[in-house]
Image (cartoon, grey):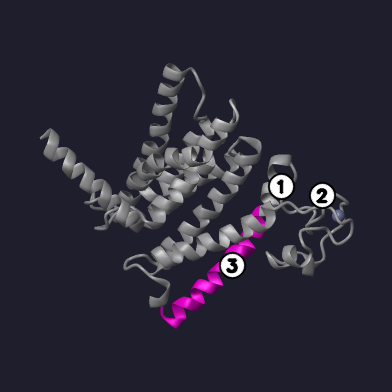
Amino acid sequence: MPLAALTPTQGAILVWLFLFGCVVGSFLNVCIWRLPRGATIGRPKRSFCPHCGSSLRWYDNIPLVSFLMLRGRCRDCGGRVSWRYPVIEALTGVLFALVYVRQGTQMGVGVGQLTVMMLVVALLVFASAVDWEFLIIPDEVTIFGIFGGLLAGLLLPQLHVGPAAYQSYEALTGHLHLDGLIGSALGAAGGGGMVLFFAFFGHVIFQQEALGFGDVKLMAMIGAFFGWKVVVMAFFLAPFLGLLYGLPLLIARSEHVMPYGPFLSIGAVLALVFRSGLCRYAELLEHFARMIFG
Ligand SMILES: [Zn+2]
């Protein structure tokens, strides 16, 4: 839906969700710094400067605004604040707004589904940022995510069962909630299985670990939430996104360890927000393949 076609109410929701996303991003920044370093999320309660250790005043902790006002420096010691902070805040805000514009204005997508989408987007932002810096995807996210996805499938079967292109075509057992759970389990098995399959072949053919077990669990999580069609689209989008980033690096330098989680995550967000169109495109390809191969 084009932005100009939004009603004033939808416009207000859009702005609110962007701001809400920035606040969520600010919380994610805390998790991104603390979790991989073994620190607890809740203690100390106040955010602090990693250079001088002084607690941040509330007005120095406003998403985006404080970074701009302080020009990216600590008020007390003048130490540099990482660019990651405003980037994660703005990114989360933009993604929440994007999910709303692309999915929240669609027929049949309710508040429950939107909430699930934004939760998963937040998990993906967190997982990607940690993978980017530490080359690991925390189990806290993916294991929680896989079980969360199965629960979401059970409680919100519309994530998987229905007439839309990205949903399963028909009910398997006729029990809506059971079918939702099955759709979720199939998505988890499909997403995880696909990565495992390619990781195995990458290992056999190229003698190289291109995909890790963290990627397997990440894709299982995405499949559990959004079904096998979205996760397949995400998987095939990711290499192109990775190449876009990796090719210049490969030309400039010879060896480079690249995290793959961020590209799987971008692929997943693209597949999610454009899922109707992408899945229809996949159906079209399937149709052509049937025509050619009988
Ligand atoms: Zn400081």
| First along the sequence among labels 2 and 3 | 3
The C terminus: image quadrant: top left
Drawn side of residue 85 relative to residue 249, left or right: right
SS majority, magenta: helix
Query: How much space separates mark 1 and mark 3, taking CA atoms?
Result: 20 Å
Q: Callout 3, which amino acid?
A: Phe
Query: How much space separates mark 2 and mark 1, taking CA atoms?
Result: 10 Å
- How far from the left and from the top, in percent, is residue 229? 32, 46
Q: Which residues are magenta?
A: 6-28
The N terminus: image quadrant: bottom left
| First along the sequence among labels 1 and 3 | 3
**Magenta span contains residue 19:** yes
Using a 10 Å C-alpha cutoff, classify the residue at mark 3 as few (fewer than 14 neighbours), some (14 to 19) or many (20 or more). some
Q: Which residue is mark 3?
A: 20
SS for dot 3: helix
Q: Callout 1, which amino acid?
A: Trp
Residue shown at 43%/67% (left/top)?
101
Q: Which residue is mark 1?
A: 33
Residue shown at 57%/59% (left/top)?
92
Residue shown at 56%/50% (left/top)?
125
SS for dot 2: loop
Using a 10 Å C-alpha cutoff, classify the residue at mark 2 as few (fewer than 14 neighbours), some (14 to 19) or many (20 or more). few
| First along the sequence among labels 2 and 1 | 1
The label number, if any, that marks residue 50 in the structure image: 2
Ligand 1's quadrant: bottom right
